[in-house]
Image: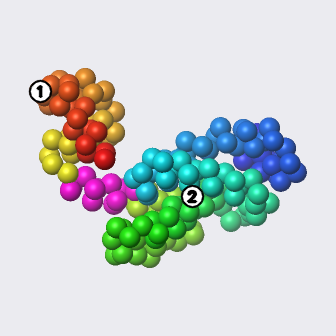
Amino acid sequence: MDDYLLLEQMSAGNKEAFDEFYQRYHQYIFQIAYKVLANRPEAEDITQEVFIEIYQKCDQYQASRGSAKAWVAVKTRSRAIDRLRKKPEVLADKLEDIITNASPAADQFVIEKMEKDILRAALLKLPLSQQQAIYHMYYDQFTQKEIALTTNRPLGSVKSSIRYGLQ
């Protein structure tokens, strides 16, 4: 069933349609929120808030304005940015870049660019060993054991580098 029909059924109160929509998009929404916020509990909160909003306002979706996936991404990104605005430690110019570069016609492009820029800036602040471990884990999709073998480091050191780098 396509997303438009799911949203129509959700609008009519169909809980099974909501369950299916949730299964399709919960990971996607969480990933966007997490990449913007870099905080798992806050990303989980945003994911829940977005699904509540989608359920309550699913009739606001207009297929003529873009895909449901883009609609969901914009809602998630907006919620996450609102959450960032409330955090005093966020750099104002970084947040301003994210907002300034936004364009409704290029939702997916903006989200991907924003994610890459934020991640690249965060990675560059880390020690080289943490950068390498995180890069291998998330970009090369290596296991921690493979990273240890590749970088010729003890497994415990690799695990620590990843944990400290993500924190």
Query: Please, is residue 23 above or below residue 90 in the view?
Result: above
Is residue 97 visible to the viewer in this orientation of the structure?
A: no
Around disc 2, counting alpha carbons within 10 Å, would you say few (fewer than 14), some (14 to 19), or many (20 or more)?
A: many
Give the numbered dot on residue 76. 2
**Mark 2 residue type:** Thr
As drawn, is 22 to the left or to the right of 151? right
Viewer-proximal residue, 18 or 164? 164
Instruction: Tell me the residue at 47%/59% (across/down).
Output: 111
As drawn, is 162 to the left or to the right of 26? left
Instruction: Tell me the residue at 33%/71% (across/down).
Output: 91
Find numbered disc 1 in the image and state the secondary structure of the residue it sits on.
loop
**Mark 1 residue type:** Asn
**Total marks placed:** 2
Image quadrant containing the N terminus: top right
Residue that badge 1 annotates: 152
Q: CA distance from mark 1 to mark 2?
A: 40 Å
Q: Which residues are magenta?
A: 115-125
